[in-house]
Amino acid sequence: GLLLQGAQEHEIRLDSSFMVGDRPTDILAGQAAGCRTIWVETGQHGAPLIETTEPLPAPRPDHVCAGLLSGAQWILEQD
């Protein structure tokens, strides 16, 4: 909900945005909001998903990288 709220308050188009995160739930949140997603492997990327009453799907990011620099480079290569 925070991504949707922030996008509305700041007039951000989420379909033109990128969610960068190092946790599975970051990627799932970005996908749910309609963003393209980048999973940065910082060590937290292997953390278990947050426990919920219903199982969460496995995250499927648009791009996986080892650090923010390579993630930013990938963003700049996108149309």
Image (cartoon, rainbow, N blue to C red):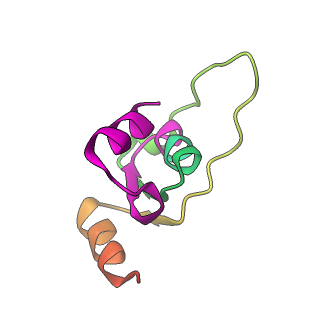
Compare residues 1 and 40 and report the one nearer the observer: 1
Q: Is residue 4 left or right of residue 10?
A: right
Tell me how many marks there are.
0
Q: Quadrant of the C terminus?
A: bottom left
The percent position of residue 45, horizontal first and vertical second, equals 46, 44
In this view, which residue lies farthest toward the left? 69
User: In the image, is residue 10 above or below residue 1?
Assistant: below
Q: Residue 28's quadrant in the figure?
A: top right
- Horizontal placement of 45 versus 11: left or right? right
Residue 76 image point, x, y percent? 29, 79
> Which of the pair 8/62 is nearer the observer?
8
Q: Is residue 44 magenta?
A: no
Q: Position of residue 14 (x, y in %)?
A: 43, 55
* Residue at the farthest right position: 54
Task: Please name whichever residue, 7 or 30, is drawn nearer the observer in this view of the structure.
Answer: 7
Q: Nearer the viewer, residue 7 or 73?
A: 7
For the point 49% across and 47% down, the residue is 30
With respect to residue 25, does 67 lie above or below? below
| Residue shown at the point (40%, 31%) measured from the top left | 2
- Residue shown at 54% from the left, 65% from the top: 62
Instruction: Based on the picture, tell me whether residue 9 belongs to the magenta stretch.
Output: yes
Q: Quadrant of residue 51?
A: top right
Identify the residue shown where x is 41% and y is 39%.
3
Residue at the far top in the pictured view: 53
Q: Is residue 62 left or right of residue 78?
A: right
Magenta extent: 1-26
